[in-house]
Amino acid sequence: MSDDVSAGPDRSTLRLALVVGGLVLAVLLGFGLGRMNVNGAATGSPSLAAEHTDPPGVAPHNHGSATGVDQGAATEPGGLAVSSAGLTLAPLATDFAAGRPGQLRFQVRDAQRRPVTRFAIVHDKPMHLIVVRRDLTGYQHLHPTMAADGTWSVPLTLAQPGLWRAYADFTVVADTGAQTAVTLGTDLVAPGDYQPRPLPGPATSTTVDGFTVGYQGTPQTGATVPLIFRVDGAGGAAPLERYLGAYGHLVALREGDLGYLHVHPETELVDGQIKFWLTTPGPGRYRLYLDFQVNAEVRTAEFTLTVP
């Protein structure tokens, strides 16, 4: 027996050594793979945070990291639905007499049909209401006030008969402090003989109250591109003033379904001009409405834009 022992370790010793060695190797491999995954090298892809970048001049906004959907650079227009994100736009009445002053009253209700009462201040206001006729005429940018019960109200006159669209653009604040930006839309009716007007042809320059307003930029489907607006008066560049916290506000509506596009502005003038970032979701004709202020008076310049 002594000769067998001196010949080498028995089988049980060999099995134990192999098991221990395998465990050590597995731990080392697991540690190495874990480090590769943390750094993004295992799959060859960086983290979601590293992949996402905002367009220049865009303020911080929510990106819905749970789904990977970028809510700040939406590819689809808003305002097409009366309900979205668990919220519903509920007008108290939708009929108006054409050409006569009226009052639009509405609530924003949650999934339990309760009126929402907590809204964030965005561009100096908690609620922005855009109203336009279905032929994209009669544009109005209004700011309703809210009662304690969550009912919003604003004076409204629908100048001509027809079907009109009202967009409520707002940001709700949850009990946790989380904010959700939503644009909801509803139809308003002014009974009478509706005579739709044809949309003006595309142009990059127009005049309003003695001011010449023009823009540069070529929007492309699915891309975020800059649009730079210049406002000139009789003596050259107009002395633009801040209106609702910015030097200009731009609303874009799509012909046909009247989809409402979210447009990002620069907070400061760029060489005396107003710079926006526009994302168009698809080809078609769009109507642009630029609100700007000079000498404490707000004016609106309108353009027709064709995206091939």
Image: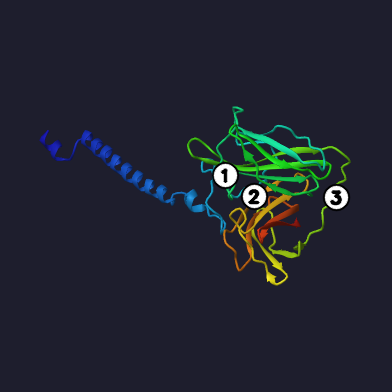
**Image quarter of residue 182:** top right
User: Which amino acid type corresponds to the residue marked 3 in the rendered image?
Assistant: Arg
The residue lying at 31 percent from left, 45 percent from top is 28
Q: Secondary structure at mark 2?
A: loop
Q: Position of residue 183 (x, y in %)?
A: 64, 42
Q: Nearer the viewer, mark 2 or mark 3?
A: 3
Q: Is residue 124 left or right of residue 201?
A: left
Q: Secondary structure at mark 3?
A: loop
| Circle 1 residue | 69
Circle 1: is it few (<14), some (14-19), or many (20+) Cα within 10 Å? few
Q: Is residue 174 left or right of residue 223?
A: left
Q: Earlier in the sequence, mark 2 or mark 3?
A: 3
Q: Secondary structure at mark 1?
A: loop
Q: Position of residue 64 (x, y in %)?
A: 54, 43
Q: Earlier in the sequence, mark 1 or mark 3?
A: 1
| Circle 3 residue | 197
**Image quarter of residue 143:** top right
Q: Going by the picture, which residue comes out furthest to the left? A: 2
Circle 3: is it few (<14), some (14-19), or many (20+) Cα within 10 Å? few
User: Which amino acid type corresponds to the residue marked 1 in the rendered image?
Assistant: Val
The residue lying at 68 percent from left, 52 percent from top is 251
Q: Which mark is residue 262?
A: 2
Q: Earlier in the sequence, mark 1 or mark 2?
A: 1
